[in-house]
Image (cartoon, rainbow, N blue to C red):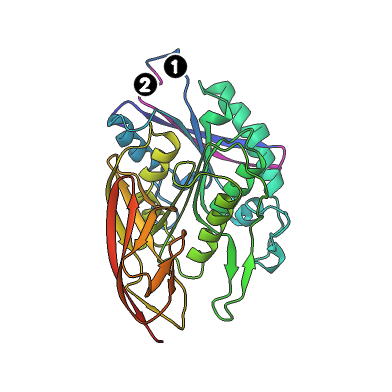
Amino acid sequence: MTNGSSLLRIENFYSASLDNSRELFVYLPPSYRHHMAMHYPVLYMHDGQNVFHPAFNGYSWNVHETVDRLVSLSLMEEIIVVGVANRGTERSDEFTHDLAGVEYREDKVTVQPKGLLYESFLIDEVKPYIDAVFRTKPGPEHTALMGSSRGGQVTYHIGFRRPDVFGKLAIVSPYFYCVDPGSSAEVPLVHLFREQQSLSRIWIDLGGREGTLVMEKHVRGVAEHLLAIGYAPDSELAYYLDAEAEHVEHDWAARLASPLLHLFGSEPAPVDMLKLCGCEEVSMAGPACRLNPVAVRTDGLTQSVLRPLYTVEDRSVLNVLEDGTIVPLTTGETVITAEYGGVQATRKVRVTAG
């Protein structure tokens, strides 16, 4: 690593909670070896074997490269990153919680939920070890958890159960529902927490090309629930629908800078550009269509704005709900304007009969 940061591998880290062993991969920031009095926030990531190194499909998140770049540009603080390897065939078990609403018995694979044991492993075994061996800032305000797919699901459940440990979450392409591509039956695998927790930053995202594996209506539904119980849109809870992204490490790596900036960046940067994406045509007969206003900040953070200010040129043609859902009223054409952070974007939308 050319800028002074370093990667360490800890082999055969034993878990008494799970009675198994795995590798831990640790990234130390550039100043770690030179400023012995400094302590650092920590980001814990699931599926640690692909965090810094190529996964089974040849792709890696290359987290060290993105962190190095953002730190070198003074866009985020220096952090320690801990990649916790998964156990292959045990991954689905360890990433699944047995909680109300999690219908794991109907999942597409046989699951014996060990999410609570994995949670204990992270909190009672991994974190104390990391805090003892490395110079960390151990408080929840400096401790984040990130994962994708089933790792996004377990990040969500652990984070909302234990905000006293993890005060920041990045939930990437979360596997919140199991959808049968043949019958289209939808099985929920997510528990909806009823009360706001002491989480200072939450990032939730997905790609628009993930098929039935991760669907926008499910992920956005959880985001809307979190807004309803009190999280502030776009500042505390940030959301991003990356329309062209698939369910692969390559695409998660491509947008990694945004959750890192949300979790560990300085004060929110000004909005540089706003683009109003989504449907150009909506039918009176349905299905429903939701706009996707994408803001790009001057530091590069890219997000779908959850609550911009919408105005409609001809309100007799359609209305726009606060979540961006278009409500067609009659056939015709009009212009929708979204405003956020002092920047505006427009989109012409046509309403057809059916």
In the image, farthest residue toward the bottom: 354
Question: Picture quarter containing residue 351?
Answer: bottom left
Q: Which amino acid does label 2 sit on?
A: Ser
Whether residue 266 is situated above or below residue 302 in the rendered picture: above
Left or right of 140: which side holds 66? left
Question: What span is colored magenta in the figure?
Answer: 16-33
Left or right of 334: which side holds 187? right
Whether residue 177 is situated above or below residue 151 in the rendered picture: below
Q: Residues within 10 Å of mark 2 (few under 14, many from 20)?
A: some
Estimate the x, y position of residue 296 in percent, counting from the top left: 30, 48
Q: Where is mark 1, residue-wise?
A: 38
Which residue occupies 71% across, 44% down? 117
Image quadrant in which the C terminus is located: bottom left
Mark 2 touches mark 1? (CB < 8 Å): yes
Question: Picture quarter containing residue 31?
Answer: top left
Residue placed most toward the observer, 8 or 41: 41
Whether residue 234 is situated above or below residue 332 in the rendered picture: above
* Real-space CA distance between mark 2 and mark 1, rounded to the nearest whole angstrom: 8 Å
Q: Does residue 292 appear anywhere in the picture?
A: yes
Q: Sequence-wise, which precedes: disc 2 or disc 1?
A: 2
Q: Does residue 2 appear anywhere in the picture?
A: no
Question: Picture quarter containing residue 111?
Answer: bottom right
SS for tag 1? loop
Image quadrant in which the N terminus is located: top left
- 20 within the magenta span: yes
Q: Where is mark 2, residue-wise?
A: 31
Which residue occupies 61% across, 76% down? 185
- Number of marks in picture: 2
Which residue occupies 63% across, 40% down? 197
Residue placed most toward the observer, 52 or 80: 80
Estimate the x, y position of residue 247 in percent, counting from the top left: 44, 61
Estimate the x, y position of residue 201 in percent, counting from the top left: 50, 39
